[in-house]
Amino acid sequence: MGLNWAEHTVEIDAPIETCFAAIIDYETFPTWQGAVVDTEVLDWDSKGRGKRVRLFIDAKIRKVDYTLDYSYDQPERIEWDLVEGNGINAADGHYLFEDLGNDRTRATYKLGLEVGIPLPGPVARRAHKTTLKSSVDDLKKEAERRATSARKASNGGRAKAREDRTREDKLAEKVGVTGPPPRVTAPPPAKTEEWAPNDSGSLVELPVKVAGRAAGLGLGVARRAAGVGLGVAGAVTDRVARLVGNHRPPR
């Protein structure tokens, strides 16, 4: 009888990687591939992709099952060889994916089958084309569903980040912080002034003058200046006392 060939092409609003990931996700086929009743992955390749897979198909004219051995040129091409089949004598074909840019993909499914039961040619071809077209249309829906979910998750993550920043800004505003804390810099060193020997005022007034001149530099500087003034005054007083004692007139 020979292989009965059919081919169908669709354009999918999803990235090529998403389309490829969907079509090799064999264990989920029964949930979104209308013709697939069940699947069983018998072996895996070194990259964790299904190597040998058994599929149970409702082909409209009858239910069949077959085991395929897959090979991959990711993410552009998938091919298979028939290992064994129940109701299928031969199977050959491939899936091709073409990246169209802007997260769009062209998918082409080409499949040749030789069924194991006698059927009139027109009936076999019509059933084959219908099943193959449905399979590709189901892939389009699933890949677009996955792409939409991925976009929503990505947008949701960005929205949450914006929400978190807004919440932080509002909290900062409540506590009176409208921006990053001001940079704290050390005050410039106080200017040291030398006191002339003939500076007016008594030695007792000297600390007060020192503190007064430093007051404009801040309380801490003023305190330090006052301490310096007291120290200077005490030193001068001691010096004067010693000078006076050394120059007392003899009795």
Image (cartoon, rainbow, N blue to C red):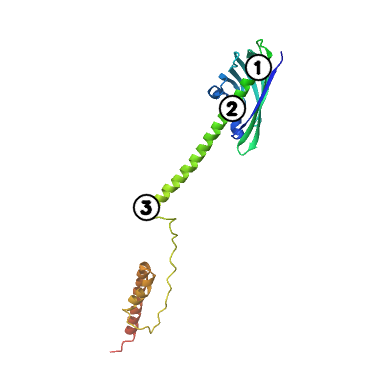
Q: Which residue lies furthest to the right in this view?
A: 2
Mark 2: secondary structure: helix
Task: Please give the residue where the numbered disc 3 appears in the rendered image.
Answer: 174
- Residues 11 and 54: in front is 11
The part of the image, by quadrant, that contains residue 188 is bottom left
Amino acid, disc 3: Lys
Who comes first in sequence, dot 3 or dot 2? 2
> Is 202 in front, or is 7?
7
Is the residue marked by circle 2 packed among few (<14), some (14-19), or many (20+) residues within 10 Å?
many
Q: Label 2 near label 1: C-beta < 8 Å?
A: no
Residue 214 lies, in percent from the top left, at: 38, 73
Label drawn at residue 83: 1
Quadrant the C terminus occupies:
bottom left
For the point 57% across and 24% down, which residue is it?
A: 26
| Mark 3 or 2: the one toward you | 2
Task: Identify the secondary structure beneath mark 1.
Answer: strand
Of circles 1 and 2, the one toward us is 2
Q: Can residue 240 be seen in this snapshot?
A: yes
Quarter of the image where one finds residue 36: top right
Judge depth for marks 3 and 1 and give the one in front: 3
* Residue 54 x, y percent position in the rendering: 60, 18
The alpha-carbon separation of the residues under discs 3 and 1 comes to: 71 Å
User: Image quadrant of residue 223?
Assistant: bottom left
- Tag 3 and tag 2, C-beta contact below 8 Å: no
Q: How crowded is mark 1: few (under 14 residues within 10 Å), some or many (20 or more)?
A: some
